[in-house]
Structures are given as structure tokens and as C-alpha cells.
Amino acid sequence: MRTRKIEVGFNYVATGPGQTQTGVQGAFGVIPAHLNELSPDAVRSLFPGFVYQLGVFIASPAVSFEYFLRNRFGYPWALTLFEVAVIVALFFIFGFGPERRGRSFHRSQR
């Protein structure tokens, strides 16, 4: 069996990871700052890291759930169903979450 050689130019190799990181950082890079803005003053230094780690802990069974879906429906459908479930959950959280829209971050002058 012959191995095929795939030739790509330097531009593809140089820009691909940059574009991927831009997408990831654009989506997830602002979350710690947003958590910091939502946190109470007394726990501002602890809150973002704690909530981030709590989210990782809560999401840890996701791999087992994806594996179950893969065995039941096949790999492409497992990824599709999992992503749909995540998107629906995010819409629910964003729509009915505790964030106070229109809240001013300026302290009142008294």
C-alpha cells in the first residue's frame, strides 16, 4: 500500500492554527472577564476560577454520554445530537438565567 503525500503551502500551515485560536479565544476568552463582572465584590478574586472549575466538574460526564450516543446512533449522529442538546441548554440558560440586563456597573454617588 502506497502512502500519499499531501503537499500544503506554508500559508495553510501558518494561518490555520491562528484562525482556530481566534475562533476559540473569541468564543471562550471573554468568559472569565464576564464571570468577574458578575461576581460579588467580596469573592471577586475567587469566583471566576471556582465557577470555571465547577463547570468542568459538571461537564465531565459528557464523554460518557457521547460514548453512549455513539453506540446507539453512530458517531456522526452522536456528535449532532450532543451539540443540539448543548445549544438548546445554552439558549435556555441565556434566556432564563439570573443575569440582570441593563444593570449599571457605576456606583451611585451618595
Image: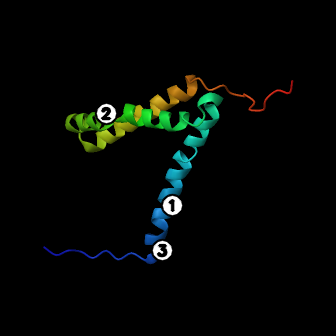
Residue receiving disc 1: 19
In the structure shown, which secondary structural element does the residue marked by tag 3 occupy? Answer: helix
* Coloring scheme used: rainbow
Nearest the viewer among 49 and 72 is 49
In the structure shown, which secondary structural element does the residue marked by tag 1 occupy? Answer: helix
1 or 2: tag closer to the N-terminus = 1
Residue receiving disc 2: 61
- Calculate the distance from the C-alpha at mark 2 to the C-alpha at mark 3: 38 Å
Does residue 40 show up?
Answer: no
Residue 11, label in figure: 3
Indicate the amino acid at tag 1. Answer: Gln
- Calculate the distance from the C-alpha at mark 3 to the C-alpha at mark 1: 12 Å
x 47%, y 71%: residue: 14
10 Å crowding of disc 1: few (<14), some (14-19), many (20+): few
x 46%, y 30%: residue: 88
The picture places residue 89, in percent across and down from the top left corner, at 46, 29
Left or right: 104, with 35 as reference point = right
Indicate the amino acid at tag 2. Answer: Pro
Callout 2–callout 3 Cβ contact below 8 Å: no
The picture places residue 95, in percent across and down from the top left corner, at 57, 26
- Calculate the distance from the C-alpha at mark 1 to the C-alpha at mark 2: 29 Å
Task: State which quarter of the image contains the N terminus.
Answer: bottom left
In the structure shown, which secondary structural element does the residue marked by tag 2 occupy? Answer: loop
Whether residue 7 is situated above or below residue 71 in the rendered picture: below
Indicate the amino acid at tag 3. Answer: Asn
Left or right: 96, with 82 as reference point = right
